[in-house]
Amino acid sequence: MLVRENEINQIRSLIDQPAVKLLTGMRGCGKTTLMDAVQQELRAKGIPAENIISLDLEARDAAEINTARRLQSYIRYRMANPGRHYVFLDEIQNIPQWEQVIAALADDPGCDLYLAASDVRQPAALLAEILPDRFANVMVLPLSYAEYRQSEADVGANDPVSEYLKGTGLPLAVRFRGTLAAGPLLHGTLQTILLQDVMLRARIRDGELMIRIFRYILQYLGKPFAVKSIADYLKKRQRQASAETIANHLSAMEAAGLIWRVPRYDIKAQTTLQSTVKYYLGDHGLAAGMSGPKSRLESGILGNIVYLELLRRHYNVYVGKIGHEQVDFLAMRDGRRLYVQIAPDHADLGQLAKPLLQIRDQYPKVILCRNMPEKTDIQGIRCLDLEDFLSGRDA
């Protein structure tokens, strides 16, 4: 079993702390498995099984626990025995007014709360409102490249980066990689996200329009565009949709973690731009879940993988603009910056260095390239092999 130490360590440091632990992330990224791992550690420490309360609010055996009152009654009943209790609630957003239950339990010194949600926005916003400074949001992303390699179990891939590019970071699909089940698992996960986490949750009725918008994102993955571009695209195909409707569909997909919106940032003016943005997928493998692997544009997938890796490293990520040039990623953290360009081929190194050379600050600037034969420096810009970066060997 793959142990995701980075994520586990974040949660482990919060055990028995007076804060609600909230795990958010796209469906299928591994939140439930992480909560199971925490429960195993608690049992190993000698916590009695009856003091660990675990409830999947999407499971059939929890179907009757569908209101805040019933949820609170169930938990209080399970907490009747003496001692400290550890409460794990999966897909908490499914219960109307769940936050009222959590607010009451958070005031109980004998209760340690762990929540998971595939809605990446609303639960955190509600907890920030009702329990300011008393909750911790742990963002859970699909498997990183390093975790993917760890899970390979010595399958002996000749080119593991290519295998990762062609594959996925969703743990269940990774487990079945190389089998006939992998493709249907990806497709099924995507369909569940679209239907259950986007359409039903956001009350979207026009599924055909949503699919068209999602296909547009796949077609222009990692390329800047505006909402109007989607409207024009649809109009040419005899499909009308207002900018507001399109924006609402995009927002619903973002809330489900299906896509990530990456704003542009003017490096000279030091300001965020609103005109155009980039979108990336919550997992790069979902491109195949919709259209099959032949539909992928390698540059878009490369960008997707690097973007998610920067998020794992707790950066705030933007698309950089310097004059008329673009920097693939401007990553900010703790008042510092990292500029990143992605080169699918060695021949692109010189061209991609040009916008970086226009930036006058002294923050690190790197170009990532597949199969870099050796470390190269272009006037202070480091050119690194993509695998070294994804493996954490970029220091």
Image (cartoon, rainbow, N blue to C red):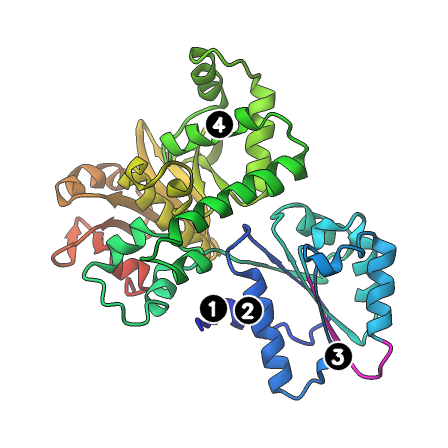
Q: What element carries label 1?
A: helix
Residue at image location 74% in from the left, 56% down from the top: 132
Sequence-first tag of 3 and 1: 1
Task: Provide residue 154's location: percent of width, then percent of height.
Answer: 28, 72
Q: In this view, does 207 lie above or below 3?
A: above
Element under disc 3? helix
Residue receiving disc 3? 51
Residue 172 position in % (x across, y down):
46, 59
Q: Are marks 1 and 4 in contact (CB under 8 Å)?
A: no
* Closer-to-camera residue (54/306): 54
Cα gap from disc 3 to disc 1, whole angstroms: 26 Å
How many C-alpha atoms fall within 10 Å of the one at disc 4: few (<14), some, or many (≥20)? some
> Does the magenta segment cover residue 87?
yes
Q: In which quarter of the image is residue 117?
A: bottom right
Disc 2, SS? helix
**First along the sequence among labels 2 and 3:** 2
Q: Are marks 2 and 3 in contact (CB under 8 Å)?
A: no
Precedes in sequence: disc 4 or disc 3: 3
Which residue in the structure is indicated by mark 1? 6
* Residue type for callout 1: Asn
63 or 282, which lies in front? 63
Residue type, numbered disc 2: Gln
- What is the span of residues highlighted in magenta in the rendered image? 80-89
The residue mark sitting in front, 3 or 1, is 3
**Mark 3 Cα shell of 10 Å, populated few (<14), some (14-19), many (≥20):** many
Residue situated in front as seen by the camera: 197 or 184: 184
Quarter-wise, where is residue 294 in the image?
A: top left
